[in-house]
Amino acid sequence: MPGFLRNYVRFVDAVNYRIGRFAMYLLFVMVAILLWSSISKTFFLPSLWTLEMAQFAMVAYYILGGPYSIQLGSNVRMDLFYGNWSVTTKAWFDAFTIFFLIIYLCVLLFGGIGSTTYAFEYGERSPTAWRPFMWPIKVVMVFGFSLMLLQATAEFLRDVARIRGAEL
């Protein structure tokens, strides 16, 4: 593999590693928000923002943690046949199926950019009582889709290298 492709894979892995490690802590943020929600409903007036903010934290957790999970190979696979295949056969299968993931991510990214643009232009707000602006979470989603697309292409390059008998 050419050097610039190796550098691309290393760079994408390094970025997604750091962002994924950060995203792990968003689970604690969500738990803290839900804990505050329980406390405020029991002892004070219920907060309007807690449920929706917990949902936003969970979206950020999943979207930003996805590329890290693919990088670690902890995504779900059907191991009925896959587990018994050789490394080269797995690489062929992964290289073929990753095209479907890339197409799906391109569609998500295209729709996410359009939705984020709409949220900025029209000041879109959530239809709940709290009425937060929607653009911050939509920006996080587009950023996460972009990171996932970069990680998917890096995984494709890694599979091509395995097929050729090398490791990246």
Image (cartoon, rainbow, N blue to C red):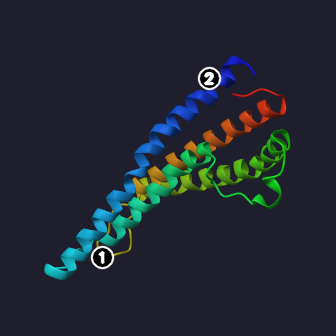
Image quadrant in which the C terminus is located: top right
Which three-letter amino acid code belongs to the residue tagged 2? Asn
Percent from the top left, x then y, of residue 47? 22, 74
Front residue of this view, candidates 82 and 27: 82
Say what secondary structure mark 2 lies in: helix
Q: In the rendered image, is residue 117 in sight?
A: no
In terms of image quadrants, where is residue 149? top right
Q: Amino acid at mark 1?
A: Ala
Q: Residue furthest front?
A: 84
- The quadrant in which residue 38 appears is bottom left
For the question of whether residue 20 can be seen, the reply is yes
The outermost residue toward the bottom is: 42
Badge nearest the viewer, 1 or 2: 2
Q: As drawn, is 112 to the left or to the right of 73?
A: left
Question: From what the image shows, is residue 91 above or below residue 142?
Answer: above
Residue found at x 80% / y 61%: 80
Residue named by callout 2? 7
- Horizontal side of residue 54 vs 168, given as left or right: left
Up the image or down, 160 lies above or below 65; here it is above
Q: Is residue 75 left or right of residue 37?
A: right
The foreground one among 43 and 77 is 77
Determine the CA span between mark 1 and mark 2. Answer: 48 Å
Disc number placed over residue 129 in the picture, else none: 1
Q: Position of residue 26 (x, y in %)?
A: 38, 54
Q: Residues within 10 Å of mark 2 (few under 14, many from 20)?
A: few
SS for callout 1 = loop
Residue 2 image position (x, y, % from top left):
73, 19
